[in-house]
Image (cartoon, helix red, strand yellow):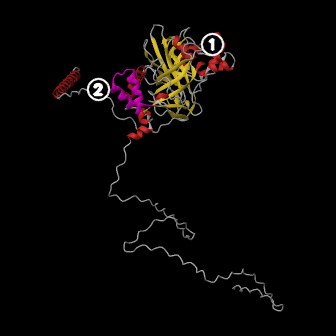
C-alpha cells in the first residue's frame, strides 16, 4: 500500500499535463480563426506647408537699423551670387524642415521660411538670376550698434589635433562634453540650444544653485570622475585654441577622425589671452596674432598655465560624427562653407539670415588690406559672438586656414538682408483696404462724445459743474423752428442829453455818541438748569 499515494500523485500530474495541452491547442485554434489585422503601409511624412508660429515684434536692442539702396552697396554687383545662393539653400533645408516644430516667434523666421519655399520652387539659378532673387525677396538694411556705425569681424577655423580614446603618458588632457549639472537660467526648454547669454549655474539640488567652475578649477580636476571625457589631447594649449574656435577634428590613434563642436560654456566672461599679453607688454600690439600667442606659450610653458587661467571661460563639446574631409556642421546643423558661413549672435539673429559684409582684411599677409565684399549666411554661433554687428567668418580647416583666421580682427560694415515681407512699405502694399462706405449710411458725426458722469463724493454737497464750451446739440422737433438771433439795441440819438457824470462816493464820517449815554451792557447769559 506504500505505492498507492505515489500512483495517485502520478495520475494527477498526467491529468494536469493533458489539460495544459488541451488549453494550448484551443488557444492556437482560436488565434488561427481570428482574422489577421494587417498594418497599413505608412506613407512618408509630407513636408509641412503651413505657417510657423505667429511672429512677434521685431526686436534688435541697442541697434541702429537704416535702409540702404542696392546701388549704394559697394561690391554687391561684383560678388558671386550663385555661390552665396548655394550656401543659403543649405540653410533653407534646415529652415523649412523645422518650420512645424520650431517655437521661434521672431518675425524674421517665418518670413525666411516663405523665401526658402520660393527658392526651392525656382530651381537652379545662375549668378544673374541669383542676384535678382536676392534683390526681389530681400530689403537691405544697415545694422550696427547705436554708438558705433562699424561692427567687429573675426575669423575662425577647424583645428586638426591628435588625440586618444584613453589617457596615456602622452595624451592626458581631457576633452569634456556638457556636464549634467550645468544650467542656463535663461533657457526655456531642454530642446533649445544652450544660449550664449544668461546666468550659467551649477545645480546642487532643486533649490540650491551656485556659479559653475571656472577654467582653473576644471584644469585642477573639478570634473574628474564624472565620466564626461570624449577623448584626450596632448596639452592644455591645444584645448584652449579648440575652445576659441568652437570646433575641431581629433585624429585618433587608429587613423579615424572624430568631429567635435561647441555645445555649452561655463558662463564666466571670455578674456582674450592676446589682450593680456599686450597689456603686460609681453607682445607688441602690431605683432599680435594667434600664431604669436602659440609661439609665446610654447616658449614660456611656466607662464602659459597662468595665462590660460586669465580666461575663466570654458567650452564644452559634443560629437558630431566620424568623418573625413567634409566640412563641419555649424549650430544650425548644416555643413559650413569656407568664406561664406559666419557665426552670429543667436539671441538676435535667425540662422539663415544673409549679411553682406564690407571690410579690409589681412588675408594675404599680416599687413595686407584685402578688400572683402561678400554675401555671407548666418549658420553658426559662439559664446564670444555677441552684438547686432558681430560675426566670425569660417575659413575652413587646417594650418593655412588657421593662419588667415588668426589674423582677422577688423572693423566691418554689416548690411542685413531682411525679408521683403517685413518691409513696412511692402507690407502696406499687401494690406487690404477697408470696404467702401455705403451711400445709404448717415454722414459721420464730428461732434465729441459726451464725457461720462463722475461719481458723487459722499459728505459733500454737489456743486453744479461748469458747462463745457461745446455741448451735444439736441435736435428740435420739425414743427418748432429754431429761435432767430437777438436784435441789438438801437443807437443813441445825437441830440440826446449827456448823462451826468457820477461823483465818487465820499466816506461818511463817524457820528460820535453823546457823553451821557454809555455803551450797551453785555447781554446776560441764561441760567443753567438745575
- In this view, the residue in front, 56 or 528, is 56
Q: In the displayed structure, would residue 237 be above or below residue 529? A: above
State which quadrant residue 37 falls in. Answer: top left
Q: Quadrant of the C terminus?
A: bottom right
Disc 2 on helix, strand or loop? loop
Residue hosting label 1:
297
Q: Position of residue 287 (x, y in %)?
A: 64, 15
Which residue: 17% across, 27% down? Answer: 26
Q: CA distance from mark 2 to mark 1?
A: 55 Å
- In this view, the residue in front, 262 or 115, is 115
Q: In the displayed structure, would residue 450 be above or below residue 5? A: below
Q: Is residue 120 left or right of residue 385?
A: left
> In the drawing, what numbered circle is on residue 44?
2
Q: In the displayed structure, would residue 43 be above or below residue 61? A: above
Task: Bin the neighbour count of mark 1 within 10 Å (Cα to Cα): few under 14, some 14-19, many 20 and up.
Answer: some
Which residue: 39% across, 27% down? Answer: 133
**Residue 361 visible to an observer of this rendering:** yes
Disc 1 on helix, strand or loop? helix
Q: Position of residue 48 (x, y in %)?
A: 33, 31
Is most of the magenta stretch helix, strand or loop?
A: helix
Amino acid at each position: 500500500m506504500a505505492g498507492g499515494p505515489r500512483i495517485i500523485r502520478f495520475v494527477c500530474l498526467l491529468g494536469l499535463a493533458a489539460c495544459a495541452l488541451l488549453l494550448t491547442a484551443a488557444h492556437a485554434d482560436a488565434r488561427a480563426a481570428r482574422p489577421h489585422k494587417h498594418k497599413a503601409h505608412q506613407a512618408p511624412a509630407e513636408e509641412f506647408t503651413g505657417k510657423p508660429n505667429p511672429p512677434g515684434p521685431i526686436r534688435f536692442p541697442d541697434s541702429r537699423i537704416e535702409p540702404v539702396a542696392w546701388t549704394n552697396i559697394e561690391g554687391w554687383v561684383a560678388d558671386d551670387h550663385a555661390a552665396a545662393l548655394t550656401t543659403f539653400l543649405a540653410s533653407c533645408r534646415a529652415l523649412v524642415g523645422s518650420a512645424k516644430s520650431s517655437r521661434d516667434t521672431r518675425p524674421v523666421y517665418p518670413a525666411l521660411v516663405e523665401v526658402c519655399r520660393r527658392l526651392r520652387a525656382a530651381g537652379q539659378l545662375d549668378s544673374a538670376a541669383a542676384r535678382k532673387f536676392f534683390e526681389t525677396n530681400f530689403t537691405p538694411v544697415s545694422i550696427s550698434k547705436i554708438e558705433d556705425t562699424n561692427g567687429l569681424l573675426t575669423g575662425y577655423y577647424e583645428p586638426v589635433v591628435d588625440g586618444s580614446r584613453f589617457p596615456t603618458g602622452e595624451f592626458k588632457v581631457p576633452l569634456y562634453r556638457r556636464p549634467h549639472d550645468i544650467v542656463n537660467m535663461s533657457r526655456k526648454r531642454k530642446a533649445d540650444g544652450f544660449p550664449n547669454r544668461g546666468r550659467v549655474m551649477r545645480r546642487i539640488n532643486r533649490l540650491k544653485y551656485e556659479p559653475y567652475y571656472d577654467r582653473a578649477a576644471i584644469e585642477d580636476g573639478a570634473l574628474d570622475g564624472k565620466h564626461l571625457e570624449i577623448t584626450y589631447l596632448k596639452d592644455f594649449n591645444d584645448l584652449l585654441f579648440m575652445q576659441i574656435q568652437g570646433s575641431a577634428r581629433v585624429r585618433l590613434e587608429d587613423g579615424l577622425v572624430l568631429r567635435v563642436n561647441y555645445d555649452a560654456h561655463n558662463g564666466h566672461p571670455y578674456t582674450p589671452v592676446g589682450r593680456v599679453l599686450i597689456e603686460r607688454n609681453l607682445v607688441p600690439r602690431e605683432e599680435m596674432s594667434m600664431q604669436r600667442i602659440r609661439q609665446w606659450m610654447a616658449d614660456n610653458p611656466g607662464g602659459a598655465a597662468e595665462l590660460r587661467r586669465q580666461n575663466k571661460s570654458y567650452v564644452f563639446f559634443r560629437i558630431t560624427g566620424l568623418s573625413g574631409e567634409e566640412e563641419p556642421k555649424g549650430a544650425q546643423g548644416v555643413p559650413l562653407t569656407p568664406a561664406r558661413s559666419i557665426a552670429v549672435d543667436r539671441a538676435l539673429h535667425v540662422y539663415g539670415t544673409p549679411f553682406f559684409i564690407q571690410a579690409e582684411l589681412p588675408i594675404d599677409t599680416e599687413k595686407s588690406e584685402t578688400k572683402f565684399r561678400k554675401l555671407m549666411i548666418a549658420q553658426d554661433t559662439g559664446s564670444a559672438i555677441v552684438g547686432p554687428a558681430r560675426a566670425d567668418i569660417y575659413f575652413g580647416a587646417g594650418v593655412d586656414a588657421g593662419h588667415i583666421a588668426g589674423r582677422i580682427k577688423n572693423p566691418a560694415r554689416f548690411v542685413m538682408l531682411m525679408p521683403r515681407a517685413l518691409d513696412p512699405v511692402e507690407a502696406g502694399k499687401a494690406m487690404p483696404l477697408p470696404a467702401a462706405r455705403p451711400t445709404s449710411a448717415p454722414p459721420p458725426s464730428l461732434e465729441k462724445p459726451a464725457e461720462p458722469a463722475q461719481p458723487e463724493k459722499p459728505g459733500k454737497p454737489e456743486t453744479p459743474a461748469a458747462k463745457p464750451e461745446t455741448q451735444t446739440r439736441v435736435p428740435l422737433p420739425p414743427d418748432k423752428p429754431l429761435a432767430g438771433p437777438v436784435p441789438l439795441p438801437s443807437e443813441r440819438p445825437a441830440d440826446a442829453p449827456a448823462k451826468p457824470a457820477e461823483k465818487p462816493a465820499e466816506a461818511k464820517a463817524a457820528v460820535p455818541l453823546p457823553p451821557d449815554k454809555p455803551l450797551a451792557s453785555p447781554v446776560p447769559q441764561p441760567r443753567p438748569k438745575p
